[in-house]
Image (cartoon, rainbow, N blue to C red):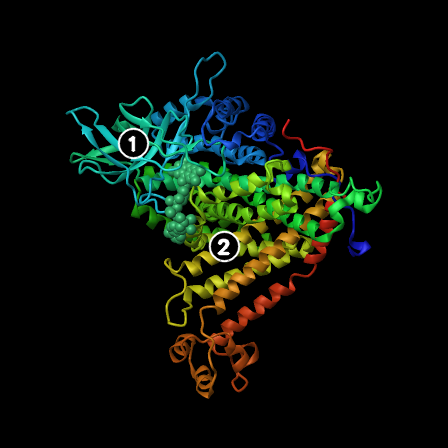
Amino acid sequence: MAVPAAVVAESLRTLPGDDVRHVMWRFSERYDLQMLVQSVRQVARGPVARMVAEGARNSHEWTEQKNALLEHYDAAGVTGVFMEPHQGGFLEGPKNLAMALVAFELAWVDAGAATGSLAGHLALSPIHERGTQEQQDKYMNLAAPARPGEDRKPWRGAFALTEPIPYVGVDTGMLGGKVSVASWEPGREPMLQVEKRGRFITNMGFANFVTAAVDSADGRIKGTCMVILEEGDPGTFDRGTPTKKLVHQLSSTSDPIFSMTVPASRIIGGYTVKDGVIIPKYSHDEVIAAVFKHTRVPVGVMTSAKLLSAVEPVIRYQRGRFRGAQQSKPGSPRYDLGLQVRQDVLHRLTDVWATGEAGASLGFHTARLFDELDPLEKEKFRILEEKGISGRGELRLFKEVNARAVELVKQRSRPEPERDAARVAELEADPLVRYAILDSAAMVLCPATKLWNTGHGATVMREAVSLMGGYGITEDCPGFLGNKWMDAQLEATYEGPEAVQRRQLSVCMQNEVFLAQFDGWTKELRHIASERPDTGACNLASAFVLWRYTHQHLQVATDAAGEKLYQGPRQGVTFALSDALAWLMAARALVLDVIALEQKGGENAVVAEGLPGLVTFYEDLAHVQCARASGEVGRICAELVYGYNLHPTWGEEARKACYEAKDLDELEDLIPGIGSCAVDVIGEGGTHPDKAGPCAHCTRVADFAVLRMKLDQCLTGARLAKDRAAEALSKVMIPEALDYPV
Ligand SMILES: Cc1cc2nc3c(=O)[nH]c(=O)nc-3n(C[C@H](O)[C@H](O)[C@H](O)COP(=O)(O)OP(=O)(O)OC[C@H]3O[C@@H](n4cnc5c(N)ncnc54)[C@H](O)[C@@H]3O)c2cc1C
């Protein structure tokens, strides 16, 4: 490999350990989380890994052997991580980062194990997010592991939304599950009859309670809600037959049937009675939205953990590939490097690593953001309740709050001397403004994490498998890479497949507060690029600009038939732009983490040793990822900007029309489907040869072309960075053997 000697500076010595992760994922100060990671890791690389190696994934049934994992989770803090200390948990405050770290550790070995543990939290989430205080205290306490001296088994839960076809799947409004009044004696609490069938419900093999989504089948109950069903309630609690999954076999999944009578106090969030009608405080949609807002982040992190876990086994495989051969002598490149004498395997592994790294950065960034957002959300609820504002009133209030949030974002993105400090302080003092800023970012970053990490991650996981040759698709593959590849597809599917995430993104990226932040992030990247060009931030900033331009263009542009492009049903437009946005978010998160490593790494003695090489390597990975993201964004945006026009045949008439049209609308009336070719035919750079100024359409298309060209030119150095990262992979020291199964 011809990497100029001058550019091969110090590089990666060993694979990044925990200290590096603490710095990059910003939990250096959180000893509680560091200890949690260690204890979960012992379970993951011990009992979980042994179970996978022994073939426990070969059965669909929830066996005694698999059930034993639950007690390991309890002992390691995996179960209690969700609860408050007074409910039997051990962590104070928001727990999004903690849960993401737990998911990461378990999925490093087996994502089914991670899913089993997360599903318990998912079952509790409706209660946690929208339950009454009594519901929260009751079920959190029951689900917490036994405290010292207590003799009880913790309750396990399942979350039942999905129903047999043709009911709930992606479309959560198609509820087949029903609730009606079973009996209602005067002055007493109503009793409800719940009929619910589930499909693919995780934890059903052992759950003691279920949080289920149902619709009213009775004029005396309004709308939909979620209810809590307990195993001991009167009626049928049929766990159903196990699902014949090809993936995640260390979690339990089945199609249960419930026909039960429960008190109305099991309606999550409570209810009021008006004119003899039970009105649940929250519809099932409101509860679900609050739940998935949080729970999708750890799922995204799971797939990234698998990609990162592939690096060490692949390097070991590559290095040892030819060691036994007669002609391969110790000291020879063939003996020492094996397959790594071939550039392609190193480049592909670099891509795997960069993808895993960017996904983890995005996931943990989002989890930390939720940790900041959660207390503010509570504060928002308190303020609204105090002011007696709900429904449309809330929307009206937030119109005004959002305007101030945009103002604050714009102020913050100016250089400090240019800011109005007093105004900034005033705006920052308003919790609703701070909430609006964080929430609008979270509403994009969460689906971006779920979409990009799992969807693109699954594709790249295949690449990791292919690097192991035939071994990759055997049960014996070190690091269980074949399993991890298949499993990734489930992570892309459950808790809402990619279509659901794209749908959310296409709505939430329209939020003006988010867009103002997006513009601020673009400036920030430009600034980073000026100081640290090796991160690829320049290329990424240009991709941000191109995306923003395309986003604006699509708001007003029409297709060849004059139909508006950016509209809900037009998923070809909105979903594609959502994908592009997710690429940007992931690459940005990695760049920010690399900067944190550079700035804070020196404070940790372990990281400080070898820091320059580590930073160089990580800058190269970020550069590779930025280049890849900008390529995707360029492709998607170009298709969207040019792809909805017809290829015109330019005659004199068209030239004349383009010249004479006052604006784009008029031009498009005259020539439906005018396209990019206008630039070639009518004039370079959007200027008509015989006219002083450009017409509106030519300007717009020409502007895009200029931005796209700039984007491509900003790729400078990207392949050199890839060469360097690849070179580092051929030199990095790895342990003699994988540390799992142990
Ligand atoms: C192992 C496993 C465990 C699970 N655990 C649980 C659980 O614990 N609790 C629970 O409630 N559910 C669970 N699920 C269900 C899971 O969440 C659903 O399978 C998932 O949400 C998709 O629903 P569906 O399978 O009905 O797909 P469908 O709704 O049939 O969608 C199929 C595909 O059609 C396309 N599509 C559908 N609608 C749209 C649209 N509006 N726009 C564009 N494209 C669209 C998408 O490509 C989508 O992937 C689990 C699933 C599995 C496989």
Q: Position of residue 622 (x, y in %)?
A: 64, 50
Q: Position of residue 274 (x, y in %)?
A: 19, 35
Q: Is residue 194 left or right of residue 381?
A: left
Q: Nearer the viewer, mark 1 or mark 2?
A: 2
Q: Is residue 559 left or right of residue 548?
A: left
Q: Quadrant of residue 533?
A: bottom right
- Amino acid type of disc 2? Asp
Residue indicated by mark 1: 267
Q: Position of residue 708 (x, y in %)?
A: 57, 66
Q: Residue furthest top?
A: 149
Q: Is residue 7 left or right of residue 158?
A: right
Label ID, residue 579: 2
Q: Quadrant of ligand 1?
A: top left
Q: Quadrant of residue 208?
A: top left
Q: Is residue 219 left or right of residue 457?
A: left
Q: Position of residue 310 (x, y in %)?
A: 63, 41
Residue 709 higher or lower than 10, as above or below: below
- Amino acid type of disc 1? Ile
Label ID, residue 556: none
- Residue plotted at (65% across, 53% down): 624
**Toward the viewer: 521 or 179?**
179
- Residue plotted at (71% across, 43% down): 318
- Residue plotted at (65% across, 65% down): 713
